[in-house]
Structures are given as C-alpha cells and as structure tokens.
C-alpha cells in the first residue's frame, strides 16, 4: 500500500523507554504501536468501546498479528500509524497497518480480530451496523469521496 491509501492516521513520538542501547525502537513495541493506532481508529468510528462490548457479552478477540520491519524508528521520531479496514469475514475483521516517519514507511502489518460471544468463546456475526459504520467511516476520510 501507499501512504495515500490510508484513511486514518494516529501520531505518536517514540519515547526513551521504547528504545534499545542504540536508540532504536525495540521490535516488540511496534505491536503496541499497532494497538494504539487501532484503538484510536476504533474510537474515531464511534463504535462500542471494549467496556461496552464486554457489557454486551460480545467482544473482539485478536486472532492474528503480522509484522514486517523495513527500517528502524529511533528515539524521539514522530511516527504516523496508518490504519485501514481491509475486509470483513462472517465473524472477523482484518486491518492493515503501516508506520511512517514522514514519507518513509518503516513497518507493515496486519491485525485480524474475531467478534465472539464471551460466554462460549465462539465467533458470532459482526453486526451489520458495525460493517456499515466502518465502511462509511473509511469513505468519509477519503479526499473527494461523496
């Protein structure tokens, strides 16, 4: 993907506690960055947060996370985390994420979630209203979309 393919970005600055002795971000922190970006994306959609989901008895469970490193982020870099919904299954949602420093892509990844009944821990259909809201949200942020 290109940076222009993303409909949502969250910005954060690399903190000292996230880097190793060479002042390069420790690899495990990129999944935390993905989680932060996804959380802010979800907040922006105005869909039920984790507390509301838990109260309703159905939540999104992480099913898969992939990550590919292309270049390192360093202490004090300002990063942009791009998040985009890449598709829906019956009970799943797939998101593509990329991390940029300016126009340089540093990290590429994917998160897959299953919407599940918490009592039986089995997937249930993603609510139609969620599908519609995410689809509309993506279109709202695309420049020039009607």
Image: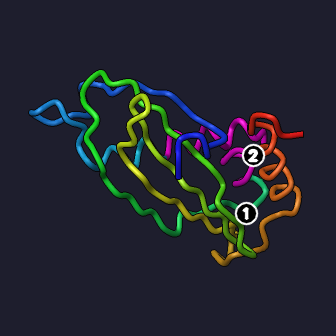
Indicate left or right for 83 with 134 as reference: left
Which residue is found at the position 68% from the left and 60% from the top? 59
Q: Is residue 29 above or below residue 55?
A: above
Q: Main secondary structure of the magenta part?
A: helix
The residue at which mark 1 appears reads as 58
Mark 2: give few (<14), some (14-19) or many (20+) Cα within 10 Å. some
Q: Residue at x 71, y 73 (%)?
A: 89
> In the rendered image, is residue 118 in sight?
no
- The residue mark sitting in front, 1 or 2, is 2
Q: Which mark is residue 26?
A: none
Q: Is residue 71 left or right of residue 44?
A: left
Q: Secondary structure at mark 2?
A: helix
Residue count near mark 1 (Cα–Cα under 10 Å), binned few <14, some 14–19, many ≥20: many
Task: Examine the rendered structure and indicate whether residue 91 appears above or below residue 134.
Answer: below
Query: Dot 1 lies on which element?
Result: strand
- Where's the C terminus, which quadrant? top right
Between residues 13 and 84, which one lies in front from this camera angle? 84
Q: Quadrant of residue 65?
A: bottom left
Structure colour scheme? rainbow
Q: Check if residue 48 falls in the magenta segment.
A: yes
Query: Residue at image x 42%, y 28%?
Result: 102
**Snapshot quadrant of residue 15:** top left
Instruction: Give the Cα distance between marks 1 and 2.
Output: 24 Å
Residue 136, percent from left and from top:
84, 47
Residue at 83% across / 63% down in the picture?
A: 127
Q: Is residue 1 visible?
A: yes
Q: Which residue is mark 2?
A: 138
Q: Is residue 50 magenta?
A: yes
Q: Give the residues drawn in magenta, as a range.
A: 35-54
Q: Position of residue 53 (x, y in %)?
A: 73, 53
């Amino acid at each position: 993907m290109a940076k222009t393919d993303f409909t949502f970005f969250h910005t954060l600055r690399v903190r000292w506690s996230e880097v190793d002795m060479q002042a390069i971000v420790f690899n495990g922190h990129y999944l935390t960055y993905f989680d932060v970006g996804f959380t802010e994306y979800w907040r922006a959609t105005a869909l039920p947060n984790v507390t509301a989901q838990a109260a309703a008895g159905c939540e999104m469970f992480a099913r898969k996370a992939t990550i590919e490193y292309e270049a390192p982020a360093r202490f004090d870099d300002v990063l942009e985390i791009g998040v985009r919904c890449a598709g829906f299954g019956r009970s799943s949602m797939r998101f593509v994420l990329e991390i940029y420093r300016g126009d340089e892509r540093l990290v590429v990844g994917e998160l897959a979630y299953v919407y599940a009944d918490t009592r039986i821990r089995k997937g249930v259909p993603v609510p139609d209203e969620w599908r519609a809201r995410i689809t509309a949200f993506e279109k709202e942020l695309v420049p020039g979309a009607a």
